[in-house]
Each structure stands twice: as structure tokens, then as C-alpha cells.
Image (cartoon, helix red, strand yellow):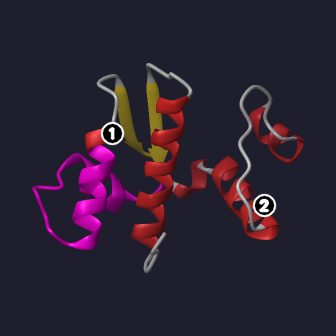
Amino acid sequence: MGVGSVIQAELWAVLAGVRLAQQLGVHRLVVESDSSQAVTLIGNHSGSLSDMGLLAEDVTYRLLHTTEFLHTPRTCNGVARRLARFALSIGNELVWIEEPPNFIQDLLD
């Protein structure tokens, strides 16, 4: 994957999510990130040839026409934080399609 910084990790995560949405045939997508830098890069990559600029361009290229990309403050992003902690503990990829995992249910209620 080639993750060298927090912003690159965020862009890779967004790209993986967008790819999954495309594979599942999702036609309307809202992507939220607590990284204002990621939101700015994707919204205005300006043809940058840096690693992050090229990654942001790949995300933008794959975005659906009905995709919203929003900045969400970290304090409002408890679900993402809990999912990230869980991901670090398992070491492989999991996807939940219909029902959220039990360990975030209390945050969704």
C-alpha cells in the first residue's frame, strides 16, 4: 500500500472505500473524513505530481457523480475511531454490508 504519513493513510482508506462502493453498485455516496487536508486534496488536487497529489487524483477520478466528500470533526467521529482501533487488532480486512458490528452499535443508537 505504501503508506508513509497519516494523510496518505487517510487517502488510501478513502480510495479503498470508494472502490468498494463501486464494486457494490452504490450510486450515491457520502464520504466523511476528520482530515481537512484530505478533503482539500481531493477537492482541489490541481494536478499535483506528488505522491499525495496523485493519490488524491485517483480518488477524484473514481468518485461517483453523486458523491459528497465532507470534513467531519474528530470529536464527531467516534465510529471511525472505534473501527480503526479494531482494525489494528485484527490485521486483515473485514467488510460489513448489512449489519454493523456489535462493538459500534451503542454509538449508532
The residue at the point 80 percent across, 29 percent down is 99
Amino acid at the residue labelled 1: Arg
Residue 75 locus on image (x, y percent): 59, 55
The image shows residue 18, relative to residue 16, as above or below, that is above
The image shows residue 51, relative to residue 30, as above or below, that is below
Residue 88 locus on image (x, y percent): 73, 69
The image shows residue 34, relative to residue 90, as above or below, that is above
Residue 18 locus on image (x, y percent): 45, 40
Could you tell me if residue 72 is visible in this image?
Answer: no
The residue at the point 74 percent across, 37 percent down is 96
- The image quarter in which residue 24 lies: top right
- Residues 47 and 107: in front is 47
- The image quarter in which residue 101 lies: top right
Amino acid at the residue labelled 2: Phe
Question: What span is in magenta?
Answer: 34-60
Is 46 covered by the magenta stretch?
yes
Look at mark 1 in the image and give the residue it sits on.
Answer: 62
Taking the image as shown, residue 4 lies to the left or right of residue 78, namely left
- Could you tell me which secondary element the residue under label 1 belongs to? helix
Is 9 covered by the magenta stretch?
no
Q: Residues within 10 Å of mark 1 (few under 14, many from 20)?
A: few
Look at mark 2 in the image and give the residue it sits on.
Answer: 86
- Residues 3 and 45: in front is 3
Residue 84 locus on image (x, y percent): 68, 60
| Main secondary structure type of the part rendered in magenta | helix
Comes first in the chain, label 2 or label 1: 1
